């Protein structure tokens, strides 16, 4: 492909014209510096754009030289962003037409309030909703996970920027040790407010006060992968009420993990969380990586320390004494 053709492809992905030209220059004669190119004042923002996009990395003693980076992850991110922008453009046109129709009919249309998203369009749509959050996200979290349960770097970054996340996890969310370690705990440490219920009635996410997504239950997801996007209306208000009711009834989880100050060991605390989540003994043992005998020994030790004789009493004591 010619240089002009490659530059056009980069611009099509959302890279600025100057940044695309500099990237081609890098491929020909890296490293490059702002001072070594035509107009340093124009070039510096373009170099930053390439670095922010993951297409270039600083090098040299003072970091003023730039080299081309492996574009695999950057191109995936640029493609996803471009898809989201195109989706937004399509929605803008549709919204304008619906506003025209409402102005002439005087009646809102149900299509303005509900949107069904299926298949491969789900992940880009969810990411588009998440990246435009300004204040808070409220979530009822339960499998299955469209993103495979990977670490939620976007949420962690938004938490650092001051966006509030309140999540109620179902017991099934703790059934996969990888999801607990790789997704839930990093978000808790980043500042997520979290609670736990043995079961949840629906998978739900509320993005600020402007949109909500509802997903099918784990029993139905294998037959039809889809989500419904709900915009502000009476149904949206009902979903807000469902979340707040679930939040009030759920068991709080320590947002900092309390591994340094808690009166029990981390593995004992994790055992109590899994027990509160309603998992069976075999599932808890597998999640902790211990035998059933060791699990029962942990339980006996905790009940002796709490002075109780049943698991229910242990759960009540743990909740009231900061063990969870």
Image: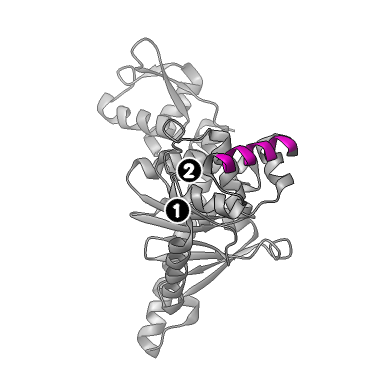
Q: Is residue 323 above or below residue 92?
A: above
Determine the secondary structure under disc 2. Answer: loop
Where on the picture, by quarter, is residue 312?
A: bottom right
Horizontally, residue 38 falls left or right of residue 69, namely left
**Which numbered marker is on residue 323?**
2
Where on the picture, by quarter, is residue 89?
A: bottom left
Residue 128 percent across, percent down from the top left: 47, 54
Instruction: Give me the residue at 38% from left, 54% from top.
Output: 133
- Is residue 52 at all visible to an observer of this figure? yes
* Camera-side residue of 162 and 308: 308
- The range drawn in magenta is 293-304
Residue 22 drawn in magenta: no
**Which numbered marker is on residue 130?**
1
- Is residue 151 at all visible to an observer of this figure? no
Instruction: Give me the residue at 51% from left, 64% from top.
Output: 213
Dominant secondary structure, magenta = helix
Determine the secondary structure under disc 1. Answer: helix
Q: Choose the circle earlier in sequence order: 2 or 1.
A: 1
* Camera-side residue of 82 and 295: 295
Question: Which color scheme does this rendered protein use?
Answer: one colour
């Amino acid at each position: 492909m010619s240089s002009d053709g490659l530059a056009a492809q980069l611009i099509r992905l959302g890279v600025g014209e100057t940044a695309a030209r500099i990237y081609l220059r890098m491929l020909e004669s890296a490293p490059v510096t702002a001072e070594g190119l035509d107009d340093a004042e124009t070039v510096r923002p373009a170099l930053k754009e390439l670095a922010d996009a993951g297409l270039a990395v600083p090098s040299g003693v003072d970091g003023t030289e730039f080299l081309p980076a492996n574009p695999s992850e950057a191109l995936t991110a640029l493609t996803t962003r471009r898809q989201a922008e195109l989706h937004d453009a399509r929605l803008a046109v549709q919204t304008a037409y619906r506003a025209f129709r409402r102005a002439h009919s005087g009646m809102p249309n149900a299509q303005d309030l509900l949107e069904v998203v299926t298949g491969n369009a789900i992940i880009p749509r969810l990411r588009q909703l998440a990246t435009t959050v300004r204040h808070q996200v409220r979530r009822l979290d339960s499998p299955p996970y469209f993103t495979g349960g990977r670490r939620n770097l976007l949420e962690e970054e938004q938490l650092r920027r001051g966006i509030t996340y309140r999540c109620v996890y179902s017991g099934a969310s703790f059934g996969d040790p990888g999801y607990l370690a790789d997704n839930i705990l990093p978000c808790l440490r980043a500042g997520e407010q979290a609670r736990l219920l043995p079961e949840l009635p629906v998978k739900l996410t509320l993005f600020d006060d402007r949109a909500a997504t509802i997903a099918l239950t784990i029993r139905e997801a294998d037959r039809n992968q889809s989500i419904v996007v709900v915009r502000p209306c009476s149904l949206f208000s009902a979903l807000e009420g469902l979340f707040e009711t679930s939040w009030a009834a759920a068991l709080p989880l320590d947002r900092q993990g309390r591994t340094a100050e808690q009166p029990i060991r981390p593995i004992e605390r994790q055992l109590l969380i899994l027990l509160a989540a309603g998992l069976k003994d075999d599932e808890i043992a597998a999640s902790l990586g211990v035998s059933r005998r060791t699990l029962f020994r942990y339980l006996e030790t905790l009940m002796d320390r709490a002075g109780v004789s049943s698991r229910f009493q242990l759960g009540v004591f743990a909740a009231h004494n900061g063990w969870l």
